[in-house]
Image (cartoon, grey):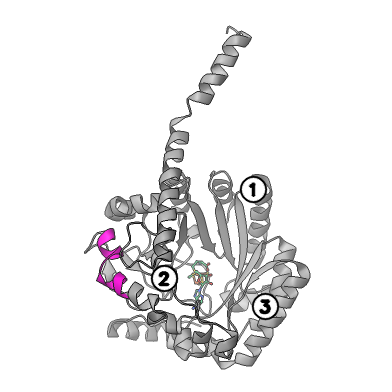
Amino acid sequence: MKTLTREAQELAAAAQKTAPSFPALRRRFLEQRQRENVALNNREWEEKKTILSSTPQRIFLQINAVCNADCVFCSKGYDYPLFRIDEYREKYGEQVTPVLQKAREVILTGSGEFLGLPDAPKIIRYFNEEFPHVEKYIATNASHLKPEIVDLIAGSGSRYTLQLSLHGSDEATHKQMMRYNAYPRVMENVRRLIEARGRSGNISVSFMFVMTTLNVENLPDFVRFAKEMGAERVLAGYFYIYESQQKYLSLYFKQDLANRIIDEARRVAEEVGIEVRLPHKFGQPPETAAKPTSCIEPWHQVMINPDGAILPCDVYGGFNENLNQKSFMEIWNGPAYRAIRTALRSGGGCLTTCPRHNPIGINDWRAHVIHRPKEDRQIAKEYREALRKP
Ligand SMILES: C[S@@+](CC[C@H](N)C(=O)[O-])C[C@H]1O[C@@H](n2cnc3c(N)ncnc32)[C@H](O)[C@@H]1O
Ligand code: SF4
């Protein structure tokens, strides 16, 4: 083979510089549209518009799967349709793809353990290739973070945040909360992920702790453990009651304990030097916990369920909108969304009892219970399942 002269080499290098590849051009174009949409979405939120020209900047895509764990607090139930990427693309791809392309972040989570699906690598590849410019967020119990999955994440060219649901700093608490024997495997997987983060630089790792009456006293140790393992942050949140038989796991019944542990966890986080996001404490008088003037979520995000249902957020109750009946924009700017935004603009509506955004709401029992309308058939089924489970 002939070697190139210096001049030819320089020309080839210049040609390469001036003619970016198709994927690079596509990404640049997508990033530009994304930036414009996010800027407009921020403006429309600031102006509290009820009808938006922008589309949401954060999309929760519910990827339902079976789960190998059986967390005591889990909201998933035991019988729901599994996510199938081909079916999803065929049914909703046309509607959802343009919205996803203009979003800043996509959250891949859902009932069960998405990374345990045989199709998980295919799903991750699809999101990496189709939406390289969109940040990705995965909530996982970390038991299926195999080398193939970690490589797909680390080599994606996208930013990824992994939220690892662990709920305990030691094997006994982990097992008590998640009711499976995966602690050694999970620890190995977490170490592999942290190593890959060091090599690739595109991964951020959060450790998640759902606070219940059973494990709350472990939270300060969990903060130390997260720091030792190399996580960037700890996310802790109250357990929400989805099924009535789980109600005594709620810290609503142990408010002083919850407050004491929240203070202690914050102190430990400062001591060891790790970011920690903790929920509001109980019993704060209004003057020490200002109620927010509105909630950003119905402007910034949507949740899309595999059956096409659309929800404003994960703690919102009944919301009867579905992509099978209406187009995305008809829902996004339709009467139901307009009503939520109108109520929120004046500080009312769901904000009154919101466990995430309203510190005073925490004192209200309703903030700890997720109200989703259920058919009688479903209630009877859950009752039978509750008797069957350990
Ligand atoms: C439903 S899980 C699904 C993804 C994955 N299996 C996991 O555990 O991360 C998503 C997140 O919701 C949290 N979660 C589940 N049930 C909850 C409840 N009743 N209250 C508060 N958080 C809950 C989980 O701990 C997890 O962090
Ligand atoms: S790992 Fe996640 S989906 Fe599985 S039981 Fe626990 S919370 Fe539910």
User: Which residue: 45% across, 44% down?
Assistant: 31
Query: What span is colored magenta in the figure?
Result: 329-339
| Residue type at the position of mark 1 | Gly
Residue 38's place in the image compared with 30, above or below, is below
Q: CA distance from mark 2 to mark 1?
A: 30 Å
| Residue type at the position of mark 2 | Cys
- Residue 178 forms part of the magenta stretch: no
Percent x, y for residue 282? 58, 88
Q: Are marks 3 and 1 in contact (CB under 8 Å)?
A: no
Earlier sequence position, callout 2 versus callout 3:
3
Looking at the image, residue 203 sits to the left or right of residue 37; the answer is: right
Can residue 30 be seen in this snapshot? yes
Per the rendering, the mark at residue 201 is: 1
Q: Are marks 2 and 3 in contact (CB under 8 Å)?
A: no
What secondary structure is the magenta-colored segment mainly?
A: helix
Occupied quadrant, residue 250:
bottom right
Q: CA distance from mark 3 to mark 1?
A: 28 Å
**What residue sits right under mark 2 in the picture?**
313
Residue 22's place in the image compared with 341, above or below, is above
- Residue 330 forms part of the magenta stretch: yes
Q: CA distance from mark 2 to mark 3?
A: 26 Å
